[in-house]
Amino acid sequence: MAKIYDAEMQYLHVAIAKDIGINSRGGVEAFDSDAISRETAGLKPLLIYSLTAPCYGVKARQLVDAAAPIPITQFLAQAWSAAHRLGMPQRIEMEDGLLKSDRGFKEWARAQGVSCEPPLSVKALRAFSRSAQDLRWAITFAQPDWHARGAPSIDAANGSLHYYDTFSMATYSGSKTSMVYDTFVSWCTRGQPFFTGSGIRDDWSPEFIAEKPKALPKPHLAVERDSGDEPLYVHGLKELVAMWPGGRRAFFRGLQTTAGDFDHWVAGRAHLPSHELAAVLEKASVIYDRRVGGYTLAGGNLLIAKTAKGVDLVYTEISNGGDLEFAFEILPPAGVELLMRALVFAAWGGETTLVLFPRNVDNLEAPLDKHSLINLSSARRAPMDVFESLDWIIVQRELFDCPQKVGVVFGEQHRDWLAS
């Protein structure tokens, strides 16, 4: 169900603009923030001011040189003018840092009949604030030949932003239902007041605004965004690494690849040298499957559940979508207990995989309790020899040199019982 927002409330947000900056000629230029820093790109930061009506997702935005911030009231005066069509609300909500930066804008807004409040939903405010950061296309929306003319000036970029945001309002119908569009039209013509005055000076302190340092891939590994040079991607590998006995750090022990390099590779921001990639794939038991024309998880591992969603994804990938020879929870013999719950499964022609579930951890045991995994059979009570093997594995779970082979060995030792 869609969230219902107060039609007379707007979100105000001010932050460092991501993915763009000011070049040495004063132009607004985009850069790949997933690969390099703004400083490396030779750009200075910009601030993005945004005011969003969340009931319909329409907004007004303005870019400003971070070295020369404008008053909040100056931006609001422009955003509430007839040119932007938003009109004045009864309330604007903003994050705590912006509220505390006040040096007069709250009193000014109150004089206009608008209160300044903390957000009723921080999550919603941040979601709309992220949406306001979609700037790479919008800053050249009104300039189809900008490539030939170079990066637009701040004024030109703001002109495009204004055109883009008001164009979005004018063409709002898009994929909306007729009822939603009709209510939007009614909202636009509701008789809302537009502001015709001016703001005040020095009405806030921008000192609270800071850009969090972003972890970047090593320069020689970085992949340029939209270059078409995409790294290999293996479904479920990130989740499998998170389930490694001893944690992610244990998985990368003995490998040249670091956890950070791996994360950038998974996100498509970096390549791994072929020999390093081969070592990662071998340790995770990833194989090339000609049937699907790509790399897939082969199984055979000992894994420890971290999240119910991760278990579901890894199980689905290893089992080829539920094409299973067997899959069930192993129960101990009557009268004894296991320290952890255990799921065992193998795809047809594949290796046996063991997943251990710590007890009483949030919703971690849900895949077993709700029987939500594809083609999962009823739990089976183990004979004493199987129980002793499993009990020993649970006790030694973080001490194995090769967790990727533990499931294989367990499957070979108890093959007759598992497949019976």
Image: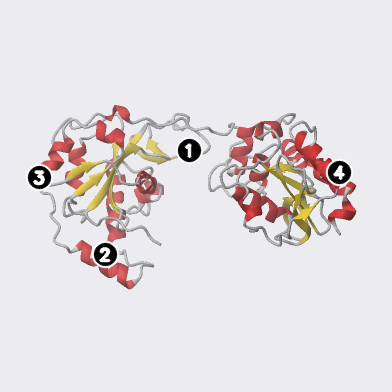
Secondary structure beneath dot 3 equals loop
Q: Which of pointers 4 and 2 indicates the residue nearer the eye?
A: 4
Question: In the picture, residue 376 is in which quadrant?
Answer: bottom right
Is the C-beta separation of discs 4 and 1 under 8 Å?
no
Residue 182's place in the image compared with 31, above or below, is: below
Residue wearing tag 3:
197
Q: Position of residue 240 (x, y in %)?
A: 68, 44
Rendering coords of residue 412 (x, y %): 88, 48
Measured as percent of width and height from the top left, residue 7 is found at 24, 57
- Asked if marks 2 and 3 touch (Cβ < 8 Å), the reply is no
- Indicate which disc residue 184 carries: 2
Q: CA distance from mark 2 to mark 3?
A: 26 Å
**Label 2 Cα crowd, 10 Å radius (few <14 / some 14-19 / many 20+):** some
Residue for badge 4: 409
Is label 2 or label 1 in front? 2
The kind of residue on which mark 3 rests is Gly
